[in-house]
Amino acid sequence: MTNFHAESERFAVWLDTHGKGRYQRQRDELLGRCPRPDHEDEHPSFRYNVSKDCWICTCGGGKGSDLRCELGYINSPSRPASRPGVAKRTEYALTNERGDLIAKHVRLDKTDGTKSFVWLGPTGETGLNGTPLATLPLYNLPKLLAAPKPSGVIVTEGEKKCEALQEHGFLAVGTTTGASGCPSDESLRPLVGHNVYLWPDNDEPGRLHMEKVGGALHRLWVTVRVIAWSEAREKGDDAADFFKRGGTVEGVRDLLRDAKPWTAATEVPKTECVPSALDASVARLAALPCLEYEKIRKGEAKKLGVRADALDRGVQAARRAAGHGAGNDRKLQGRALALADAEPWPEPVDGAALLHDLAAVFRRFLVLPDGAAEALALWSVFTHTHDTFQVSPRLAITSPEKRCGKTTLLSILGALVPRPLPASNVTAAVVFRAVEAARPTLLVDEVDTFLSNRDELRGILNSGHTRAGAYVVRCVGDDAEPRQFTTWAPVAIACIGRLPDTLADLSRAGLTEPPRVGSY
């Protein structure tokens, strides 16, 4: 009998003394009532395998090998080092927006330096009873909800790093899905309206996790920046390690000031990493001629465990990275959208003076009705703060006849708003796909020439008026998977005559008299 087995036998004897009644022995298993204090089973539902040192409660759903810790059993010195004991147990409480306890996340720091986690339900039962991790609230949610908007919020992976930042006076929240997951849009929605800083663990899983979180926040129109701690070691160094290694509050503030805006191509400083097997397969497929790839794509996708359309996107991205255009299998017409982000002014700006100057710009080049210049100035500023609002009024630019200055006005707006996307003709599919992909400010001209009989387009333009309803759903890919697209974007619409009633009702500014172009 090994030392490990002997230790398990001693634990079995200990259970008979400290458990709930006597346990029936069947070969290497003990059968009886669950010994955990949080589970009152009337009938035997507990099995402990002595030879494998593992247990399961068929009624409560618990299982694992940390039962000793839960019951307060002290491990024997003869227990092998490969089965370390628990040096520290920490519980983190997750609450919803009302402060109700949703779950407890138990961190078990082992004597060998490793760690493991256990989920407990609100009444202490092991597990989450089928609740998806992605739907759990962010850790420290009540303090986030109590903070004024906009506040600077640091997002960490897990609760320990969040606590370390909180102890030093920073507003922080932690994700609880683990590195392989990502909170749902609904779980991340409390961050809307705040300035978010992502602090990834300095390892590949940590960087990929924050890349997922950044993408989800990007879809919610949250301003996101990525913290890069250049002195972090390639061992998963994180925010808690920052303070352990002598980091200061001022040091964190320096990192926040130097944080770079998140983009899908954000590269957090890291040491060289080994490509995964999936990356290698995608690179191999990207090097194939287009027809050869088409013949094997479905079989390769099945072997890799991904959808064929997802594999297509990965191959196309690999080909672009290798300088082979958008895929070698087809030549795209037109040109890619290249929308530049606005560069923040380096010093604080007087808001009233800014609005006054903007109104003067509109008056310089246009003859406008009373109040129109001020409305245009306000709407221009609104586009830069769009993600802090719940309602997005459309800017209606109408005139009774042609050559009244509508196009000139859109050109001026194009120089003032963020990520301007001018167009004189669009389709329904273009609107929601462009908004989903590029987060533009739409500047649509000549609407009177193409909108009148296109109910789908009108409905999509209407849908982006409120954040809650700014979505359309379409089936995409070989598997016709339903996917959600956002339509939440600032929109200015120019036309001769009146807009359709629904769009006109969603507009809060318009040029009801003919604006004449100035002579400058």
Image (tube, grey):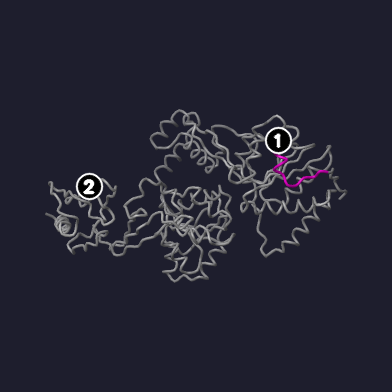
Type of amino acid under label 1: Asn
Q: Is residue 135 left or right of residue 400?
A: left
Q: Is residue 109 left or right of residue 357?
A: left
At label 2, counting other C-alpha atoms closer than 10 Å, the crowd grade (few under 14, some 14-19, many 20 or more) is some
Instruction: Classify mark 1: helix, strand or loop.
Output: loop
Question: Is residue 505 placed above or below 6 in the rendered structure?
Answer: above
Residue 75 placement: quadrant: bottom left
Residue at screen point 19% across, 57% down: 19
Which mark, residue 425? 1
Q: Where's residue 310, x and y in %?
A: 48, 37
- Magenta residue span: 502-512
Q: Where's residue 25, x and y in %?
A: 13, 49
User: 382 or 314, which lies in front?
Assistant: 382
Instruction: Classify mark 2: helix, strand or loop.
Output: loop
Per the image, the residue denoted by label 2 is 45
Asked if residue 136 is among those painted magenta in the image, a careful observer would answer no
